Image (cartoon, coloured by chain):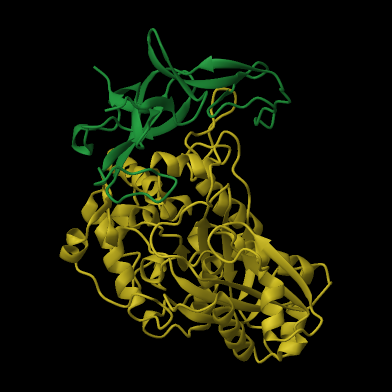
Amino acid sequence: MSRDIAILGVGMHPWGKWGRSFIDYGVTAARAALKDAGVDWRAVQFVSGAATIRNGYPGQVAGATFAQALGWQGAQVNTSYAACASGSQALAAARSRILSGECELALVIGADTTPKGFLAPAKGERPDDPDWVRFRLGITNPTYFALYARRRMALYGDSVDDFAQVKIKNSEHGCENPNARYRKRFTPAEVAASPMVANPLRLMDVCATSDGAAALIVASLDYARRVGRGDAPRVAAISTVTPTFASANIEMPDIATDSAVAAPAHSFRAALPAKAYEEAGIGPSDVSLAEVYDLSTALELDWIEDLQLCARGEAAALLRSGATRVGGRLPVNASGGLACFGEAVPAQALAQVCELTWQLRGEAGARQVSGAKVGITANQGLFGHGSTVIVKR
Amino acid sequence: MTRKTEKPFLEGWFAQGEAGAHLLGSRCTSCGTYYFPRQARFCRNPACAGEQFEEVPLSRRGRLWSYTDACYQPPEPFIAADPYLPFAIAAVELEQEQMIVLGPVVQGVDVAALTVGMPMELVVETLSETATERHLSWKWKPAP
């Protein structure tokens, strides 16, 4: 029995700072996905919402909120919270329902309205919360991105010019994406002239926070065939594994790694795609394109290596060769990535799947990756959450 | 001018001993895994069911794993000086504990003075001040 499900429709609300409720964005994305799928909302049997807690909308539960806004119609409902991986876990919940035969047709949806500036912890004096402790010390999200970037420079000889080239590449891709927030081509001089945020990373190396929404209509393969969509792109794997003790890297929001005295150190980022490749029964050499979580320019290079698309330490050389731009051998972030979108936490992992779907259908316009057959995503957020999704056609 | 009260910003996380400052960690008596912040209930090693911990001072010297700085004023609960003073941040690898610990770098040491792999040592220094209090924290400092 195939473990795949079909992606019948995708939709997004453009990323930006629109000053409206996340519900507006979500409904817009859901209606776009329903229209793309040719599905009536009342036929949807399961609504799988991706939530955020820290910065979004405490008091409202994503799945039911969207279901009500679209019009209560008695579907089963679920809400997933997994920080930046909320979208992938919502997709995993829908896949489980479909593969178990509990439903045939599901809406997966995530939307966010974000504050300006740094993502910050909840208020109050809470020393038991590592997120509180690190902000009390002045350790923000870009601190971690910068530590990884500096480490690359020391270990592999990457330069700040390499990091700037990631931004320039992604800005060229994002220019062609109507859902991207920043649609401007950057030059090396512009990146170098932007203010330093966390040395060696400048403002143009670090992603913003954005409003946005993404939605998917997914179905069983039987359903897809019945409606004449047996050739639709399929979800071939979803990995949402936890880290394995001892986790090797210093991760948000912690101020220390696990001690590796009694157990070997493991890389969390590398574990996420490894599980997905195993589940899909394919390898890195089968990948046509990747959408990775470029919270910083340098982090895109880490992800390329974690996805095993090149050997450890060689991602900057791959970038310099032009392989990772659209038109190259292995385009990375053809959507423009977080560099052009900014992060809308519960929508972001779904936005990655939307891009892969358009690419595999050959509908990505000027940013189309020719002959795209297999796409992979990578993302990671707070508290040991991350995901990799493989989409194939 | 009245003297400000000095206190650690977190009680029981670090101490100033005769040999210098050190972090207060804990160690699982079953498998030897170190913890910072301290762990006192359950060992997080999946192969260990340990529930007994001893409090241990962590190594006060290590090697610089990576570093950066905070050019923009962090949001609350960070308490900033006015005007805001950027500071460096270090990730230091402790050899005996095989773990990496973050901390601010002492005032007056810029990222230009730091190199991955250099020896670092722990000190206690002012993290923030209010009108009546001076809050102390552990910080990293290049070691001789």
Residue B9 image point, x, y percent: 45, 31
Residue A135: image location, x then y, percent:
44, 44
**Residue ID at (31%, 23%):** B120
Classify A361 as above or below A135: below
Left or right, A100 with respect to A11, comes to right
Residue B140 in percent (x, y) is at 33, 27
Residue that appears at 52% across and 23% down: B12
> Color used for chain B?
green
Say which of A33 and A345 sits in front: A345
Say which residue appears at 37% left-offset and 44% top-offset: A148
Give the position of the C terminus of chain A as an image quadrant.
bottom right
Q: Residue at x 43, y 49 (%)?
A: B76
Which chain is yellow in the picture? A
Quick check: A195 left or right of B140?
left
Q: Name the quadrant of the N terminus of chain A.
A: bottom right
| Image vertical order of residue A150 relative to residue A283, above or below | above
